[in-house]
Image (cartoon, rainbow, N blue to C red):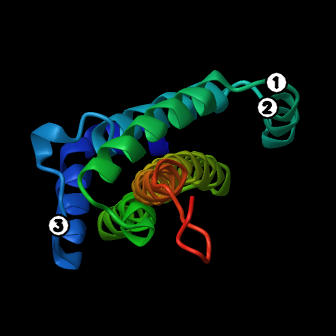
Amino acid sequence: MLHEFLTVHHVKLIDHCQMLAAARGPPRLPRDEMRYGVPLFLAQVIDTLRSELNPGSTDDQSEAASARTEKPQATQVSKTATEHGRQLFERGYTFDQVVHAYGDVCQAVTELANDRGAPIAAREFKILNHCLDDAIAAAVTELARRRYHLAWESSKSAMDARLRDLMQGLRLDIDRRETIALERITTPTSDADGQR
């Protein structure tokens, strides 16, 4: 079963994902900072596989049952992937790098399974892919949300600065016009004959 394979080869899979990420170049998360990354994701995939693969039911029954119920594992995958997206944003990751970080998991699992001659059942692979889809969607959404917020804050700061400059210019113009008006009011004028 895939969950047993993932459990036995957990460390090798993490190392393989690190190697794939290193081959793409910086930025990288150090192993001890990947709290929400590959190690946690693999543990959640293992839990999801265990809970969704009921050994006493057929694939059709199991799929029908899982389609009718809310999956707490999927929610947990999304929550931690959202946090991982925040972590990757803070490290300067691009959308491409976030997607590939999760794609590395799939690649590492399939390559290691192939090397070991370990078959992956279609249902198990479907569950793995569903977890990957949820994680990628959540991480990319968080990255996009944070980038949008950063862009908005930057734009807002620039707009605030422009408004401050405009207001200062208007104040100076108003002060100048007031000075001119006061000078006209307080300065005696003479008529054409030089009389007041």
Distance from the alpha carbon under mark 3 to that under mark 2? 35 Å
Displayed quadrant of residue 94: bottom left
Residue at the spot 65% in from the left edge and 31% down from the top edge? 52
The residue tagged 3 is: 19
Q: Nearer the viewer, residue 105 or 123?
A: 105
Residue type, mark 2 in image: Ser
Callout 3: SS: helix
Distance from the alpha carbon under mark 1 to that under mark 2? 5 Å
Distance from the alpha carbon under mark 1 to that under mark 3? 37 Å
Residue at the spot 78% in from the left edge and 41% down from the top edge? 59
Residue type, mark 3 in image: Met
Q: Which mark is residue 123?
A: none
Q: Earlier in the sequence, mark 1 or mark 3?
A: 3
Q: Position of residue 71 (x, y in %)?
A: 69, 26
Relative vertical location of residue 1 with respect to residue 171 in this rendering, above or below: above
Q: Are marks 1 and 2 in contact (CB under 8 Å)?
A: yes
Q: Position of residue 151 (x, y in %)?
A: 46, 58
Displayed quadrant of residue 195: bottom right
Q: Nearer the viewer, residue 19 or 25?
A: 25
Q: Is residue 25 left or right of residue 178?
A: left
Residue at the spot 41% in from the left edge and 46% down from the top edge? 85
Q: Earlier in the sequence, mark 3 or mark 2?
A: 3
Callout 2: SS: helix
Quadrant where the C terminus is found in the figure: bottom right
The residue tagged 1 is: 69
The residue tagged 2 is: 66
